[in-house]
Image (cartoon, helix red, strand yellow):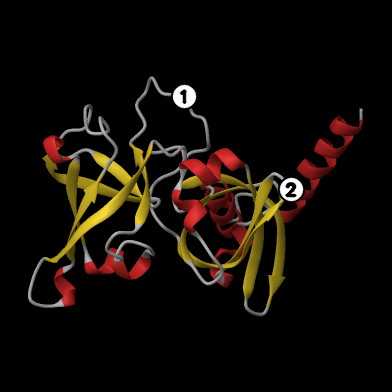
Amino acid sequence: MFTGIITGVGRIAAIHDLGPSSSYGKRLGISVPDGYLDDVGLGDSIALNGACMTVTTLDPAQQQFTIDISAESLDKTAGLTEDGARINLEKALRASDRLGGHIVSGHVDGIGTVSHFAPVGESWELRVLAPHALARFLAYKGSITINGVSLTVNSVADSADGSEISINLIPHTVENTSLGDLKAGSQVNLEIDTVARYVERMLQAGVLAPTSMASMQSTYSKDTAE
C-alpha cells in the first residue's frame, strides 16, 4: 500500500527484453538518488509512476535496482518504456508512516492524456482527459493519483471524449516529482480513490439505495448549515 507521497525521482537507466518476443515483458533498470536504497531489500515493493513493482536486483554501489514488468502491465501503464525518462518513486507504506496523501494501491486503473499544463500565478494548472470508464469515480475535491502523486480534483468536465479533470499543482510538487516534465499530449497513469471504488460497488450490489444516499446527503446538508 502507498499514500501518493513521492519519496524520490528516479530515471529509467536500461530496458531489456525478458524473452524473444514482447509477450515476455521487460526488465527495467532504475537509477535512484544517493542513499535511496539504504532501506530497500530484494522483494520490496516500490511504485513506479504509480504502478506497484517488485525489486528483483539491487546494486547500492551504482544506486540502481531492477524490476521485471509483464507485457500486460506494460500495456496498461504509461511512461515506463522510455529510456532515460524520469519517474516518480514511492516505497511501500510502513505501519509507522504518516498517511500524508490518501490510500493508494499501486494498481493503475486507466491511462489519461494531458490536455493542458501551464503556470497560473505561482502554481500550475494540470488538466487531464480521463477515459469514460473512470468518469463515475471522479468528483470535485475528490482524490486521484496521477503518475503516483496524490492530488485533489478541482473540477470535472464530462464530454464525448471522456472526463477532463483540473488539478492545481504547487511549485513544490512540480519541482520534486516528474510531473514537471509533462506537456500537452503526455500520457499519465491514473488510479481512482479506493473509497470511490467501494461506494460504486455497493451501489451496484444494492447495498446503498439511491433513497438512502439522498437521505445521507440531506442530513449532511442540514448539519453543515447549522
Q: Is residue 170 above or below residue 29?
A: above
Which of pointers 2 and 1 lies earlier in the amino acid sequence? 1
Q: Quadrant of residue 127?
A: bottom right
Q: Which residue is mark 1?
A: 98
Front one among 29 and 141: 29
Front one among 134 and 181: 181
For the N terminus, the quadrant is top left
Question: Which residue occupies 29% across, 42% down?
Answer: 46
Q: SS class of the residue under badge 2?
A: loop
Question: Which residue occupies 56% across, 69% down?
Answer: 184
Q: Which residue is mark 2?
A: 121
Whether residue 197 appears in this view of the structure is yes
| Left or right, 112 with reference to 223 | left
The three-letter code of the residue at mark 1 reads Arg
Question: Which percent across, then down, holds residue 140?
Answer: 71, 51
Q: Is residue 154 above or below residue 136?
A: above
Question: Which residue occupies 85% across, 30% down?
Answer: 223
